[in-house]
Image (cartoon, rainbow, N blue to C red):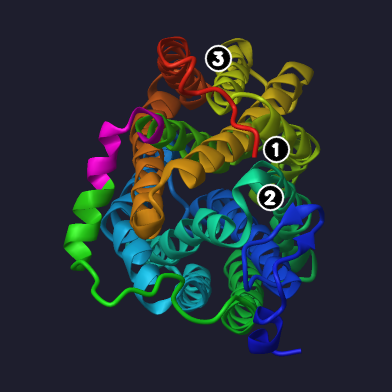
């Protein structure tokens, strides 16, 4: 059945989710594949980076925290410059075109990673990658809002979290092993890198095609006159005056920053510890780090449905506050952790995994509910931009703390950030208790 034919199916349900008119089960399957693939690639690229820095480029381990932070920094600069444009563009040309183009750019960037021979090549590849990631991540919450009815968005976002967990675990348990697998077959470090990234570039190109043919056709909003793109962006920024949207922006800052801290600095921490303390090769340490961080992703996977149900049944600001509290405790507790492979680290990673998916779900539902429909793409674009700022701050501050203070410094820092936003959520909840009551829908 074609996308046009499935789009004609009356509103129905998918996995208990009430669908918007003209949304089919096929569209939802493609959407959740998008969720799976996005987090899989967002995990794979930064967490294989220590292998490139150590074995391919041969960089000084004492400088890799700052270098990793700088790579994230410039990548997030690109996201900041493009994410609002992607959101507005999706309102004009449609979600599927932007999503497919985003995966195409990611595919190109992954191929470039494999052929990087110096740091500047890596920076260029990261810029292309970030341009594609900006497009895809902007579309995730936008598509969820387009496809799921409001009374099911908590559940829909819960399944989004499940797919995120599965995608991250696929990367951590399987894809991060690829460099070691190719080296075991006789490839040198450069050959293993090229083979790993070429394989993943081909997979990502295939996913781009699936997005283009599987998502709903056309632009979601049809009006006779449209405001200029820059005006839409200004209106999206102006929505920060709405307390709930402002809170969602802050929560996005925390949620995306959390992902950056784990994705960039945990594998680097594990790689340096494994090579310096345990005598592992870089490829072995990356694979071992992936196995450990997979516990965090498993916690995300198992807790995602719980957070989805909680978001639908509790006051949504209360649900957000709960996830921020878990984040503050999980990240802050790493202050006492020295060994990234030890038991205390695993406990922290479980809490961190729960906090990550909880912040993504609760903030995403909050922004989907309160974003004006005619500005949804632009508002979600600014929402994603706030997350990009979170990654930017996590990258620069975290990189410095990693090299000059504690290897767990980036985690401790974001525990403190989570605590600050938690205070804001509690204050807003108490001041607006009547307005913020859960609506029976």
Residue occupied by mark 3? 332
- Circle 3 packing at 10 Å, graded few (<14), some (14-19), many (20+), is many
Residues in magenta, as a range: 237-245
Place of residue 291 in the rendered image (x, y in percent of width and height, measured from the top left): 77, 42
**Residue in view at x 57 percent, y 33 percent:** 359
User: Can residue 189 be seen here?
Assistant: yes
Q: Nearer the viewer, residue 36 or 285?
A: 36
Task: Tell me the quarter of the image containing the N terminus.
Answer: bottom right
Q: Which mark is residue 156?
A: 2
User: Can residue 277 be seen here?
Assistant: no
For residue 58, side relative to residue 198 (left or right): left
**Residue in view at x 68 percent, y 59 percent:** 36
Mark 3 and mark 1 in contact (Cβ < 8 Å)? no
**Residue in view at x 41 percent, y 70 percent:** 221
Q: Nearer the viewer, residue 417 or 233?
A: 233
N-terminal of the two: label 1 or label 3?
1
**348 to 439, vertically: above or below:** above
Mark 3 lies on a secondary structure that is: helix
Residue occupied by mark 1? 308
Mark 1 and mark 2 in contact (Cβ < 8 Å)? yes
For residue 235, side relative to residue 328 (left or right): left
Place of residue 354 in the rendered image (x, y in percent of width and height, measured from the top left): 69, 30
N-terminal of the two: label 2 or label 1?
2
Q: Nearer the viewer, residue 345 or 353?
A: 353
């Amino acid at each position: 059945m074609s996308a046009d034919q499935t789009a004609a199916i009356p509103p129905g349900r998918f996995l208990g989710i009430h669908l918007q008119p003209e949304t089919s089960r096929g569209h939802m399957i493609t959407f959740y594949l998008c969720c799976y693939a996005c987090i899989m690639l967002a995990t794979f690229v930064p967490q294989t980076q220590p292998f490139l820095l150590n074995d391919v480029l041969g960089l000084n381990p004492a400088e890799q925290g700052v270098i990793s932070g700088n790579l994230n920094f410039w990548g997030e600069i690109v996201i900041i410059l493009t994410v609002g444009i992607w959101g507005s563009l999706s309102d004009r040309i449609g979600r599927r075109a932007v999503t497919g183009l985003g995966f195409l750019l990611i595919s190109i960037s992954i191929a470039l990673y494999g052929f990087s021979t110096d740091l500047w090549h890596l920076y260029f590849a990261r810029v292309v990658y970030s341009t594609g990631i900006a497009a895809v991540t902007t579309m995730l919450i936008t598509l969820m809002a387009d496809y799921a009815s409001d009374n099911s968005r908590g559940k829909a976002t819960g399944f989004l979290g499940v797919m995120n967990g599965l995608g991250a675990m696929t990367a951590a348990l399987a894809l991060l092993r690829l460099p070691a697998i190719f080296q075991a077959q006789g490839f040198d470090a450069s050959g293993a890198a090229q083979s790993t990234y070429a394989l993943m570039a081909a997979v990502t190109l295939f996913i781009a095609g699936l997005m283009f043919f599987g998502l709903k056709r056309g632009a979601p909003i049809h009006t006779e006159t449209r405001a200029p793109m820059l005006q839409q962006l200004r209106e999206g920024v102006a929505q920060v005056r709405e307390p709930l949207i402002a809170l969602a922006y802050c929560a996005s800052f925390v949620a995306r920053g959390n992902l950056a801290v784990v994705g960039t600095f945990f594998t680097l921490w594990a790689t340096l510890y494994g090579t310096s303390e345990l005598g592992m090769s870089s490829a072995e340490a990356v694979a071992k780090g992936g196995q450990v961080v997979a516990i965090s992703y498993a916690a995300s996977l198992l807790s995602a449905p719980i957070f989805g149900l909680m978001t639908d049944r509790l006051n949504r600001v209360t649900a957000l506050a709960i996830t921020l509290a878990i984040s503050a405790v999980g990240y802050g507790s790493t202050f006492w952790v020295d060994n990234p492979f030890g038991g205390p680290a695993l406990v922290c990673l479980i809490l961190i995994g729960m906090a990550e998916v909880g912040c993504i779900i609760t903030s995403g539902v909050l922004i989907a509910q309160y974003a004006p429909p005619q500005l949804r793409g632009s508002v979600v674009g600014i929402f994603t931009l706030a997350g990009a700022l979170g990654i930017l701050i996590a990258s620069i501050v975290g990189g410095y703390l990693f090299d000059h203070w504690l290897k767990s410094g980036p985690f401790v820092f974001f525990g403190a950030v989570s605590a600050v936003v938690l205070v804001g959520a509690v204050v807003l909840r108490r001041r607006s208790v009547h307005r913020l009551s859960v609506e029976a829908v």
